[in-house]
Amino acid sequence: MPKPDPFRDFVLEQLGEVPWLSWRPMFGGTSFYSHGRIFAIIARGDLYLREIDKNATILSEMNTPLFEYPRKDGTIGTMRYRRVSADVLEDRERLTEYARIAGA
């Protein structure tokens, strides 16, 4: 049984309109899926949406950073997941719209 996580539960509630929504624990965070495809992650207490070529411009309008992680060589790597801004996270309709753009 997964540990209680109020932030994950809040995100699930906000994404309630996403079709075939599911989630799995992932590396101390959470991954979110729609129709079996990953479209978002929670890492270090933030929600990130997958940024693919067709939606990069739209998601970059949130003006938030990409997901960063430390590499073994001491440098910082990035993944194409853009952090969701607080105003989008609080707006269920906008978050659902962005989630669909991210592949949900």
Image (spheres, grey):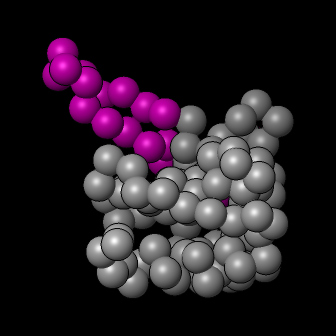
- Where residue 42 appears, as percent x and y from the top left, is 44, 59
Q: Residue at x 64, y 80 (%)?
A: 14
Q: Does residue 74 lie above or below 46 as drawn?
A: above
Is residue 60 among what the camera can see?
A: no
Specify whether residue 65 is painted magenta: yes
Part of the protein shown in magenta: 57-79
Specify whether residue 94 is painted magenta: no
Q: Residue at x 55, y 66 (%)?
A: 85
Q: Does residue 29 lie above or below 55 as drawn?
A: below
- State the count of labels: 0
Identify the image quadrant of the N terminus.
Answer: bottom left
Q: Residue at x 68, y 74 (%)?
A: 15
Is residue 3 among what the camera can see?
A: yes
Q: Name the image quarter holding residue 89.
A: bottom right
Q: Name the image quarter holding residue 19.
A: bottom right
With 69 as the anchor, is 96 left or right in this view?
right
With 67 as the anchor, is 60 left or right in this view?
right
Toward the top, the furthest residue is 73
- Where residue 101 appears, as percent x and y from the top left, is 80, 52
With 74 as the anchor, is 103 left or right in this view?
right
Q: Residue at x 48, y 57 (%)?
A: 24
- Where residue 45 appears, as percent x and y from the top left, is 35, 66
Depth check: 38 or 42 in front? 38
